[in-house]
Each structure stands twice: as structure tokens, then as C-alpha cells.
Image: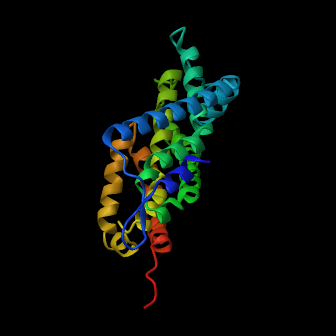
Amino acid sequence: MSALEKYEQDDQFYEGGEALGGRMGFLDHLEELRRRLIISLAATFVGFCVSLFFSDRIFTFVMTPLREALPPGGHLIYTDGAEMFVASLQISFLAGLMIAAPALMLQAWMFIAPGLYVHEKRLAIPFVLSATLCFLGGAAFSHYVSFPAASRFFASFANGFVEFQPRVSSALSLYMRMMLACALAFQLPTLTMFLARMRIVTARWMLRHIKYAVLGVFIVAAIVTPDGSPVSQVTLALPMLGLYVLSIAIAWAFAPRRPAA
């Protein structure tokens, strides 16, 4: 019996026949959070161990956009003996996070599931699939669009007096922060689907407040963009606007339909 099925069996029924997840005290919530965190860390550690065997290939794949932005004969450098060792660990952790993404999204759902109605718990599979695909999609967008654009922007300042030779640690730190920012920003459709199903937001409300959404998107992009460059901010803000428009359609599609009179 899965944990989600156990939650459904433990539901308490109110008048009208609609069930609400079993009530939990504050300490119960803390215990449930601890359990989900332990499972999430274990899944990430397994992904980290698997990725560690391929850290050289993953590093080459990750740094390819930056290497292509360098002038002919240019290369990355490292000035500390342990820098490449730490970089291989960071790369393995990032890849392990991508591998463990479905398990992480499932644990996030299992943590909030006890407080949901039975009909809301049926969103488990759509939520986990959508959150995982959006997370990986944001990571892919960062690797193929945002990071190459930022790399070309920084490399464009090189001239006859200065040469662009980025350090491995700085480049990898920028890559990881941009990837995590994009992966989290791309969760907007999943969040909208969940909120629309719970009648917290509607497509009409989102459409009516689209001008505030545009302002908020650029503010969020300016805050979460790690390097602060306008190129990075624009490459993050534009897809977020597209995701907001997509979220309006999602809110309309997943809104509960009122039964006919």
C-alpha cells in the first residue's frame, strides 16, 4: 500500500460527503517533513554517486557553451589545486539533482497530500509529471539559451589589451545558479495548475492582472539572475512571460467545472 493510498484511507469526512486529509499536529508535520527530506537527500545522493563516475564527460558538456564563446585558442583556467576537484563534485551534485528530480517532486507532493481533499489528491500524477518536466525544461533552457547568451555577452568585452580567460570555479558557479533559477522559474505552470484546481486563481483573474505580472516578472528576473547582466535578465524574463501566458490557458483548462443546474 502506497503512502498516498494510506492518506486517502485515513481521510475524515465532513457533512456533504467530501473528505479532507487526516488532521496532523505541528509535531506530526515536522516528523513528516523530516521523513520527506531524508528520502529526498537519499535520492539526490544516489544520483550524485552515479554522476560521479561520469563527472569528466558532464563537465565537458556543461562548459561547452562557454568554450564556444571564447576566442580561438582561448580556454578556461584554474588557479587553485583543489579547484577542479571541487568542480567535479559540484558537477556531480548538479547532475544528481537532475536525476533525482522525479523523486524530489514526488516527496514534495507527499508532504502536502495529507492536507488535501480526496479529489485534489488525484492530481498526484499530473503534478509530479508536470513539475519534473518543467524543472528539467528550465534546466535545458538555461544550458542551451541563457548560459550561452551570458557567456557571449561577457566574452564580447575582450579586446587587444585584455583576454577573456574565465576561472573554472566562477564559470561553474554562474552556470549552477542560472540553471537553478531557470528550473525554479519554470515551475509557474505547475503552480498555476495546482492553484487553479483549488479555486485560488482563475484564468480571468490572471488575464486581468497581466500588466502587474509583466512588472513582477522583470523584478523577479533581476533578483534571481546571479550575474545581474541585462542579457541574463532578459533571457529569463521573456520565457517567464511566455510561461505566464501558458499558465492562463492552464488555469482555464484545469479550473473545476460547475455542475449543470
The quadrant of the picture occupied by the C terminus is bottom left
**What is the x, y in percent for residue 114?**
44, 51
Q: Residue at x 60, y 23 (%)?
A: 75
Front-lying residue, 79 or 208? 208
The total number of labels drawn is: 0
Pick out the residue farthest to the bottom.
261
Q: Position of residue 207 (x, y in %)?
A: 36, 72
The answer to whether residue 209 shows anywhere in this view is: yes
Depth check: give the residue in front, 258 or 202: 258
In the picture shown, does residue 71 fall above or below 3? Answer: above
> Is 77 placed left or right of 222 in the picture?
right
Rendering quarter of residue 71: top right
Please state the horizontal and vertical placement of residue 144, each as a whole percent of the image.
Answer: 59, 45
Kindly identify the residue that appears in the image at 35 percent across and 66 percent down: 200
**x and y percent of residue 253 in the render?**
50, 73
Query: Residue farthest to the top?
Result: 81
Q: Is residue 167 visible?
A: no
Q: State whether residue 54 is above or below residue 251.
A: above
Which residue is at 54% across, 17% downward? 86
Residue 48: name its quadrant. top right
Work out whether residue 72 or residue 174 is closer to the camera in this orientation and state it: 174
Residue at 54%, 8% in the rendered image: 81
Q: How is the protein colored in the picture?
A: rainbow
- Frontmost residue, 78 versus 112: 112
